[in-house]
Image (tube, grey):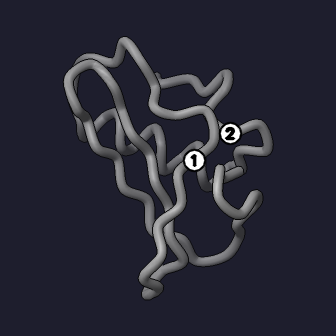
Amino acid sequence: MTDEVGVVTGDLTVVTELIGDQAHIRVQYTGAEEWYTVTGGPLKGVAGDQRRLHAAMVRAVQNGLPEGLEGVELD
């Protein structure tokens, strides 16, 4: 689920930006120009390894996020 266009499916690119203790998660259709913010972001109070966080976000997107980031497990 994204703020801008709702549900997106298909071949997606995921970017995870860690700014301070917040993680900003965006997706785009691979090869497109437009980026969409995953609903519920940014995740607050995030600390630790950015690679681990990004891997968790990619898994979450692959599994579908009908409610956005609410309830996403980072481990």
On the image, which quarter does residue 72 sit in? top right
On the image, which quarter does residue 42 sit in? top left
Q: Tag 2: Cα neighbours inside 10 Å, few (<14), some, or many (≥20)?
A: many
Q: Residue at x 25, y 40 (%)?
A: 51
Q: Is residue 31 above or below residue 34?
A: below
Which numbered tag is attached to residue 3? none
Q: Is residue 72 above or below residue 54?
A: above
Tell me the distance, in whole angstroms, between the alpha carbons under discs 2 and 1.
Answer: 6 Å
- Lateral position of residue 11 relative to residue 14, left or right: right
Q: Residue at x 63, y 41 (%)?
A: 39
- Lateral position of residue 40 relative to residue 16, left or right: right
Q: Position of residue 53 (x, y in %)?
A: 35, 34
| Mark 2 residue type | Gly
Q: Residue at x 54, y 71 (%)?
A: 12
Q: How many marks?
A: 2
Q: Are marks 2 and 1 in contact (CB under 8 Å)?
A: yes
Q: Residue at x 53, y 51 (%)?
A: 37
Q: Tag 1: Cα neighbours inside 10 Å, few (<14), some, or many (≥20)?
A: many
- Lateral position of residue 52 relative to residue 75, left or right: left
Q: Is residue 7 above or below residue 69?
A: below
Mark 1 lies on residue: 38
- Lateral position of residue 23 relative to residue 69, left or right: left
At numbered mark 2, what does the secondary structure look like: helix, strand or loop? loop
> Which of the marked residues, 2 or 1, is nearer the chain's N terminus?
1
Q: Position of residue 58 (x, y in %)?
A: 48, 50
Q: Position of residue 63 (x, y in %)?
A: 68, 49
Mark 2 lies on residue: 68
Query: 4 or 44, which lies in front?
Result: 4
Q: Position of residue 18 (x, y in %)?
A: 25, 35
At numbered mark 1, what does the secondary structure look like: helix, strand or loop? loop
| Mark 1 residue type | Val
